[in-house]
Image: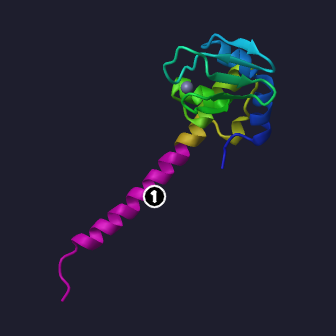
Amino acid sequence: MSRIPDEIIQQVRDRIDVVELVGRSVALKRAGRSYKGLCPFHHEKTPSFHVNPDRGTFYCFGCHEGGDIFHFVQKTEGLGFLEAVRSLARDGGITIPESSGGESGLAERIHKANELLQASFRRELLREDCPGGP
Ligand code: ZN
């Protein structure tokens, strides 16, 4: 149910290098086919945080935090998935088509949904508050 097309998400995944991304906040050392460093998600003295450039994923053997580039940005910057995708798309110079969900479109949809919800709550309340009956 993503409002950003899958092919855009795939483009971002292809464009953003997980080692470069993680390397901005974690000092990574090459270890065979992968990279390792000190985990940003828990305190440690020996590196158990691994980055796999082939798969574009990271994993920590200490706290078992792991995922892809989007998950990393979500965790480190406290963003939601779509925000993380947008942020990385900006980084990679990838334009997300407006029709598939600009901020305003999303806000409007949420607003509409809230209105509907409130209307139905009001109806419920009125029904319950209604005195009378046998
Ligand atoms: Zn960890």
Magenta: main secondary structure equals helix
- On-image quarter of the C terminus: bottom left
First to last magenta residue range: 108-134
Depth order, front residue of 52/1:
52
Q: 10 Å neighbourhood of mark 1: few (<14), some, or many (≥20)?
A: few
Please name the residue shown 48% across and 19% down the image. 43
Residue 54: percent from the left, percent from the top? Answer: 81, 27
Please name the residue shown 22% across and 70% down the image. 129
Depth order, front residue of 26/30:
30
Please name the residue shown 43% across and 53% down the image. 115
Instruction: Judge from the rendering whether residue 22 lies leftward or rightward of residue 93; answer left or right.
Output: left
Image-quarter location of ligand 1 = top right
Residue 126: percent from the left, percent from the top? Answer: 28, 68
Depth order, front residue of 72/101:
72
Q: Can residue 73 be found in the magenta stretch?
A: no
Residue 101 in view of the camera: yes
Q: Quadrant of residue 15?
A: top right
The residue that mark 1 highlights is 116
Residue 85 in view of the camera: no
Residue 35: percent from the left, percent from the top? Answer: 72, 18
Q: Quadrant of residue 3?
A: top right
Q: Is 71 above or below relative to 38?
A: below
- Furthest toward the bottom, the residue is 134
